[in-house]
Image (cartoon, rainbow, N blue to C red):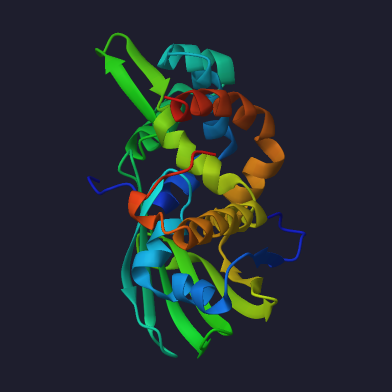
Amino acid sequence: VTNERKQELVLERTFNAPRDLVFKVWTDPEHLAKWWGPEGFTTTVETLELRPGGNLLLTMNAANGLIIPTKGVFQEIVQNEKLVFTTSSFEDERGNAQLEVLNTVTLTEENGRTKLTLHALVLKSTPAVAGSLAGMKEGWNSSLDRLSKTVSNLKGK
Amino acid sequence: MARTATTSDVFNAVGEAQRREILEYLANGERSVNDLVELTGARQPQMSKHLKVLKEVGLVSVRGDKQQRLYRLNAEAIKPIHDWSKSFERLWMKRLDRLDDYLQILQKGAAKNDRKKKG
């Protein structure tokens, strides 16, 4: 995510699964924890209140002890069709989230398959996060390549 | 300041160009403070400050005594940053990949195995 680019993302994906199952794995804490990720992290769904204004709290735990909590609030829920929720991550020492995103997930059924559309809109990203993300993307590619060698060695342990 | 490092600390730590440079050098092996001062052209107090920040967030480890302190990259700590630094899009693409896999597993009734697919 560079500063110039519009901080908005639309993705479509079709799953070979019925819509009610797709909705279920998004909204059932046990299921959500299984796939939310990222890779290498164990996710715990601490809170999931499936109602407008309801809270969402996920913690992602890396093997090295790093913990990434993500807080969210549900805005809109249409059973099997739509989920709208905010997520806030990377709190600073005063508890202010440095990244806030509005996520809209829409599900449509097509011949027993389910098309998912994700619309993610960055509501807020502080210079610290935007800067480090942009810095890494633009100025850190070569070193990241080098570092990723070390990293992939770890991964292949 | 003996508080636990948070992710935002780690992002702040790598958000600074000279600290990224230090990590690059450390990716090639252990270095002393003097080595790093020489390599980067930074002043010693500034270098100590940077290394302190990197150490506090767990990106580097140190060994040795006061005479010769050797810093090295903690590659394990770099990994989450590496993952997170991939664009927002990539994060979501991978998440949807995992969702896809998970839905397949569920439908095969193999969810109990909780098999983790390595990518």
Residue B31 image offset from top left, x and y in percent: 44, 13
Residue in the picture at 56% in, 29% down: A148
The front one of B32 and A87 is A87
Q: Quadrant of residue A157?
A: top left
Give the farthest residue toward the front: B108
Q: Quick one: B70 or A87, which is closer to the camera?
A: A87
Left or right: residue B69 compared with residue B99: left
Q: Quadrant of the N terminus of chain A?
A: bottom right
- Counting labels gives 0
Residue B15 visible in the snapshot: no
Residue at x-position 53% and y-position 58%: B104
With respect to residue A82, does A56 lie above or below? Answer: above
Taking the spot 50% from the left edge, 42% from the top edge, the residue there is B81
Q: Is residue B114 depicted above or below B68 in this figure?
A: below
Residue A124: image quadrant is bottom right
**Residue A140 in sight:** yes
Residue B64 on image: x %, y %: 27, 12
Image spot of residue A3 (x, y percent):
71, 58
Name the one closer to the observer, A75 or B67: A75
Q: Position of residue A2 (x, y in %)?
A: 71, 54
Q: Residue at x 44, y 45 (%)?
A: B10
Q: Is residue A90 above or below residue B40?
A: below
In this view, B12 is above or below A48: above
